[in-house]
Amino acid sequence: MGKEDFFSNVYEIVKLIPRGRVTSYGAIAAYLGAKSSSRMVGWAMHGAAAKADVPAHRVVNRQGLLTGKVHFGSPTRMQELLEAEGLTIENDQIKNFDNYFWDPAKELL
DNA sequence: TGCTTGACGATCA
DNA sequence: GTGATCGCCAAGC
């Protein structure tokens, strides 16, 4: 804990995502700095999904596609969670994604 | 120790 | 607009 893991930073950002909003791996990576890459964020989420404190379902790829839905135990778990927050998912993709997009570097500023 | 894989993103053809 | 390739860096085998 004393050491600031890259994962911890990602968790902090994801926790700050407001309900009914979503963000992308690249946005988080960009907020943390050029040192991080989208892939690292994705890998960090690999462990974040196991944490109930981290709403990993609010993190999707740049296309608003629920690429990591398979990591939620059920292939439809992620979609249901997002729909429960007022979002609309169609074909594993968030509709009006740009309208729900939450940029940490912009909103969290 | 070294190669492969991976919840991505951007660019080139 | 679609398909393919490179870059990013860490974990797994």
Image: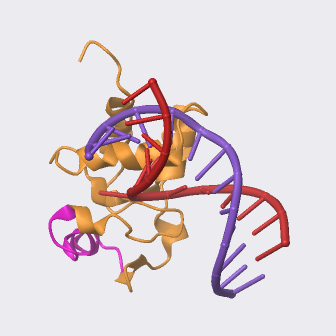
Chain colours: A orange, B red, C purple
Residue A9 picture location, percent across and down: 38, 31
Q: Position of residue A66 (x, y in %)?
A: 37, 70
Total labels: the figure holds: 0
> In this view of the protein, which residue sits in the foreground, A1 or A88?
A1
Residue visible at 22% across and 75% down in the picture: A75
Q: Which residues are magenta?
A: A72-88
Q: Quadrant of residue B11?
A: bottom right
Instruction: Give the quadrant of residue A57.
Output: bottom left
Establish if A15 lies above or below B4.
above
> Is residue A41 rendered to the left or right of residue A2?
right
Observer able to see residue A16: no
For the N terminus of chain A, give its image quadrant. Answer: top left
Left or right of residue A73: residue A85: right
Q: As drawn, which residue projects farthest toward the top?
A: A2
Q: Nearer the viewer, residue A78 or A35?
A: A35
In this view, A21 is above or below A47: below
The vertical placement of A105 against A93, above or below, is above
**A58 or A74: nearer the viewer:** A74
Q: Residue at x 22, y 77 (%)?
A: A76
Q: In this rendering, does residue A67 appear at all?
A: yes
Instruction: Give coordinates of residue A74: x percent, y percent.
Output: 16, 72
Nearer to the camera, C1 or A22: C1
Q: Is residue A62 on the magenta stretch?
A: no
Q: Residue at x 31, y 15 (%)?
A: A3
Is residue A77 magenta-colored? yes
Counting from the top left corner in percent of width and height, residue A36 is at: 53, 36
